[in-house]
Image: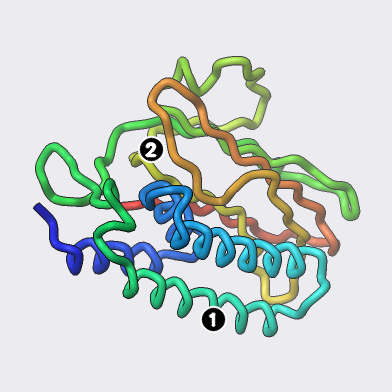
Amino acid sequence: MKTLATIQEELRGFVAQGNDLALAVLKKRLKPNTEKYQVLLALEARYHEVSRQLIQDIITPEAATQVFNKCRESLLEFINNLQAADMPELAVTTSDGSGLADVYNGEVLYRIPKKMAVGVEEECIVRMAFNRQKLLHDFQVQVGDVMKDLRISDVMGVELIDPNGDKAFTITTLNDTVQFLEKDLVNEWIFCVTPIREGVYPLVLSSTLAN
């Protein structure tokens, strides 16, 4: 059986992968309706509020980064202060006893237009499922859609990133970055992308395993 220290070390590893992932994992595994859980919800609300302000250009990227770093420090402190009573089902247990999330063969479909007009919002879609039948359920495939095999886990993070030094797109999302995948369901991420400069610029689609 895992010790408290081992579980805390695993959770700190999730923090290293990003605040979104760490918050999602902690919410899944902490005992709800407790004081610790309410503290976690307050941390999550603070993080998402700053993310919203950043998207709406209410605060600068520099100011947002400072707050995100403080959120990260708060999450690490939160994990360090956890007690066994706070997390009756916190440990991740797999068939091999490794304590890591299982990884499976899955399917991904993404729709990202190759051409967009400046100032016109386009909807970019990413869908994931454990099989193609679920992936395409209630979905009309269009020319240009890309489907691939993908290694997936029970927790996946998906981001659409503008990697350009001078911002070329504004990107907002309608879904949580990190989602828990159910074997009988399809998960979907929708990004609203608006080009703000003329020219040819890349977009980066990033997916992250939670193991």
Q: Is residue 71 above or below residue 161?
A: below
Q: Decide which of 18, 12 is in the foreground and name it.
A: 12
Query: Would you say the residues marked 2 and 1 are in contact, meaning their CB atoms lie under 8 Å apart?
Result: no
First along the sequence among labels 2 and 1: 1
- Tell me how many marks there are: 2
Q: Is residue 74 above or below residue 92?
A: below
Q: Can you tell which of label 2 and label 1 is closer to the viewer?
A: 1
Q: Decide which of 117, 59 is in the foreground and name it.
A: 59
Q: Residue beneath label 1, please?
A: 70
Name the spot of residue 27 as percent of width and height, x first. 45, 51
Residue in view at x 27 percent, y 49 percent: 88
The picture quadrant where one finds residue 36 is bottom left
Amino acid tagged 2? Leu
Q: Secondary structure at mark 2?
A: strand
Q: Which mark is residue 14?
A: none
Report, in whole angstroms, how far the alpha carbon at label 2 lies from the one at label 1: 34 Å
Name the spot of residue 4 as percent of width and height, x first. 19, 64
Disc 2 crowd rating (10 Å Cα; few below 14, some 14-19, many 20+) is some
Q: Which mark is residue 150?
A: 2
Residue in view at x 90 percent, y 54 percent: 119
